[in-house]
Amino acid sequence: MEIVILEEAAELGRLAADAIVALLQHRPGAVLGLATGSSPLPVYDELVRRHEAGEVSFAQARAFTLDEYVGLPPGHPEGYRTVIEREFASRVDLPANALHTPDGAAQDIPAACAAYDAAIAAAGGIDLQILGIGTDGHIAFNEPGSSFASRTRIKTLMHQTRVDNARFFDDDLDAVPVHCLTQGLGTIMEARHVVLLATGEGKAEAVQHLVEGPVSAMWPATILQHHPHATILLDEAAAGRL
Ligand code: GLP
């Protein structure tokens, strides 16, 4: 793993955006893996800025998101499809049909999950996957105990994750869904380059496990120690326990 520690979240965003811009300049039809949560927002802001400056186009790109809540009504402002459209896709020239998200409203959940993995494979796999990390060490919604071989599937959220995410639901824990669909750790590990961003003291324990801990399903992000091309972008607070 390549570990980069910088002072400001905006600097982390610029570095991650540099990697995406370079990829798209080299291969305009590249497949991007997008993440929700607050950590990647500086990346998206920087990509929008570069797009507006004419430095990068997403017109031929494809994008897959990591995860989606189950049980939110379509169009709910915190549904991850809506979030990624609002924070990124609608601000650049990515065609609407090039944005793929797991279908949290599907009647047949296992079929929807299998179809999602098949769509990623049909696109040729993900070239660059943006990731955040949960305070419990989850990536996407692969909570502690997730199999390293897991594929896209339904998961139950940990209480701590629901508490962490309640801020997006007016601090109403009951409004936070209990289930989600998430790419598996096996799915994520197939991305050719993963770029994980973590900022703030709240992530320091998870980052310590990610970088220095033994590889353990109890800290799912530790599987990235086995990834051939993982870049970990940290601010000083998130790196505080290294
Ligand atoms: C959610 C998402 C993850 C994200 C994590 C951290 O649980 N499913 O993909 O990495 O939150 O979010 P944040 O970056 O807001 O701390």
Image: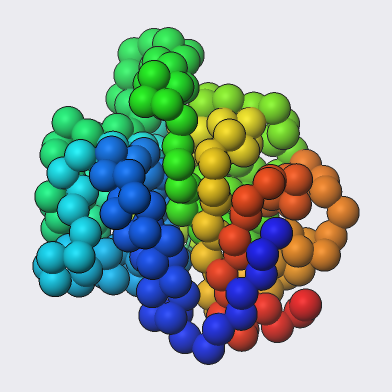
Quadrant (top left/top right/bottom left/bottom right) for the C terminus: bottom right
Question: Is there any visible trace of residue 76 in the rendered image?
Answer: no
Name the quadrant of the N terminus.
bottom right
Quarter of the rendering containing residue 25: bottom left
* x and y percentages locating residue 10 in the rendered image: 39, 80
Q: Relative to 211, is 4 on the left or the right?
A: left
Residue 150: image quadrant is top right
Relative depth, front residue between 163 and 235: 235
Q: Which residue is painted at 51% across and 33% down in the image?
A: 183
Q: Is residue 26 above or below residue 124?
A: below
Apparent side of residue 79 relative to residue 133 in the rendered image (left or right):
left
Residue drawn where x is 18% and y is 53% of the image: 57
Q: Is residue 136 left or right of residue 15?
A: right
Q: Residue at x 77, y 42 (%)?
A: 217
Residue positioned 59% across, 61% down in the render: 231
Residue 210 image position (x, y, % from top left):
73, 59
Q: Residue furthest right?
A: 214
Image vertical order of residue 218 relative to residue 53, above or below = above
Left or right of residue 26: residue 15:
right
So how many labels did they put on this image?
0
Is residue 8 or residue 27 the one in the foreground? 27
Q: Position of residue 147 (x, y in %)?
A: 72, 31
Name the residue nearer the viewer: 124 or 135. 124
Q: Residue furthest front?
A: 26
Coloring scheme of the render?
rainbow
- From where the camera sits, is residue 7 visible? yes
Above or below — where is 103 with respect to 197?
Answer: above
